[in-house]
Image: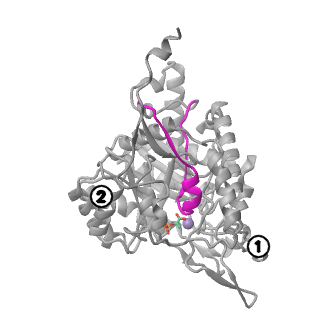
Amino acid sequence: MDPRSMTPLPPSTIIAAEGWTPASWQSKPIKQDVDYPDKAHLDKVLEKIGRLPPMVVPGEIQRLRQQLADVALGKAFLLQGGDCAELFDYCSQSPIESKLKVMLQMSLVLIWGARMPVVRIARMAGQYAKPRSKPTEMHDGQEILSYRGDNVNGYDPADRNPDPERLLGAYFHSAATLNYVRAILADGFADLHHPSSWNLHHVKSASLRQEYQTIVDRLTDALDFMKTIGADPNSAGSTVGSPLSSLKTVDFFASHEGLLLEYEQALTRLMEDPSNSSQQKYYNVGTHFLWIGDRTRQLDGAHVEYFRGIENPIGVKCGPSMKPEELVALLDVLDADKQPGKVTLISRYGADLVDEFLPAHIKAVQGSGHVVVWACDPMHGNTKQSVSGVKTRHLLDITRELSRAIRIHQQHGSHLGGVHFELTGDRVTECVGGSMELLDAELLDRYETQCDPRLNYEQALDMAFLIAKYQEK
Ligand code: PEP
Ligand code: MN
């Protein structure tokens, strides 16, 4: 007799938040909803997405939760970055490689500065949907629907009707992007970007270039030393490896704003808990980390309802309009069990407002018993109109908000656990300033974003050097 038939497995228990299902958000008021004219077509697409395999698995999601718990407790630093709006066209070898390269290089500098492991989360492999301030816009004297991101409609003014097939496109472009990221990382891509090969010619100021070069040289020495003595940095016991973690094996997580709830629901699956096989829990298997945007974080709204039920670590954007008591109420809903690092608060006040709003938010969280990751997004509160007429951000404002956030946390017995940037690995000209001293008049040279302005490769590295300098003190 087959011994397995004698000992039936105990039935697994479903662990879920009270009154929550993957569809319970549907009975709540929703913001930024997309109105699809052909509902039957939408349903057919969603049913198909619901049958497609997970893109990520619970074990990876749990590993990220552990790493973010380390960040919340001050044992690791978070780097989150990528495009404002990812395009289906970025699902191609070169844009993926350049984004990975800049994130890996930034994280090396940060590891060196903080003497701590860095958790890398890319706004990538699914960051398609965009909340918009207005549902329509004017184009050549005509009112047309706003561009809502590649998973909803096209940027081309003639292609603005929402098309459900684009949701399927989002799944396949995300899967193909993740597939390539996983392949090149497994193949040693991270090792190819050793700091000794970094080029710092873009740094205009000689003294700043010298400062950067000193960091690169010391980093190179440290890595060479590790190699020479044959140290295995991954054996140090931390969930993220030791600070100078081996370049050969790096964790790299994906994230996006959880905006289109129909899509997120179709990718929400009941899966076995990797640390307790007798339990099943709900995971969003379309990405590792999702965040709620500043426009959709209403306490009684659909997005908060959806987010409260998934096992993934989540982010909440937090700006000047957030009341301290509202922040605590949100945390009570989203992190009911008070798990360190479950929620990342991504603050985005703007350089002129951070002093006014951040202290009260820090105090509210401290009094609440929730242990969060505090990340600073110094981009979204600092968007300005350029002289040339396009949206831009000045590195001086970005730096000012970031350095104030670091200082304010220190002064309040808290710590800034991470940063959140809109960046690209390519040589675009969308933000002003930085070590390359990009001028307003140069913005139109390579202004390519279809949404918010991003740091280019050099400006992204500037940010890493800047933070490393602060952390070293
Ligand atoms: C974004 O991160 O692109 C975004 C829309 O941010 P926020 O929700 O903070 O405005
Ligand atoms: Mn943006």
Comparing 149 with 21, the one in front is: 21
- Bin the neighbour count of mark 1 within 10 Å (Cα to Cα): few under 14, some 14-19, many 20 and up: few
- Secondary element type, mark 2: helix
Query: Vertically, is 310 above or below 28?
Result: above
The picture places residue 306, in percent across and down from the top left corner, at 45, 58
Q: Nearer the viewer, residue 269 or 424?
A: 269
Q: How many labels were placed on the picture?
A: 2
For numbered disc 1, what is the local secondary structure?
helix
Q: How is the image coloured?
A: one colour
In the picture, residue 404 is in which quadrant?
A: bottom left
Disc 1 residue type?
Answer: Asp
| Cα gap from disc 2 to disc 1, whole angstroms | 41 Å
Mark 2 or mark 1, which has the lower sequence index?
A: 1
Q: Report which residue position mark 2 lands on.
A: 332
The one nearer the camera, 208 or 83, is 83
In the image, 453 versus 324, the foreground residue is 324
Q: Does 353 sit left or right of 93 as displayed?
A: left
Q: Can you name the residue that lies furthest to the right here?
A: 158
> In the visual, does 187 lie left or right of 215?
right
* Quarter where residue 227 is shown: top right
Q: Does residue 141 lie above or below 428 as drawn? A: below
Q: In percent of the image, x 64 and y 43: which residue is there?
A: 178
Three-letter residue code for mark 2: Asp
Asked if the magenta segment contains residue 164, the reply would be no
Determine whether label 2 and label 1 are within 8 Å by CB: no
The residue stretch that appears in magenta: 249-277
Check residue 234 in the rendering and tell me which mark sits there, or answer none.
Answer: none
Horizontal side, residue 283 vs residue 321: left or right: right
Q: Check disc 1 and report the residue beneath it.
A: 159
Q: Residue furthest top?
A: 1
| Residue 300 percent coordinates (x, y) | 38, 69
Residue 268 spot, x, y in % from top left: 53, 49
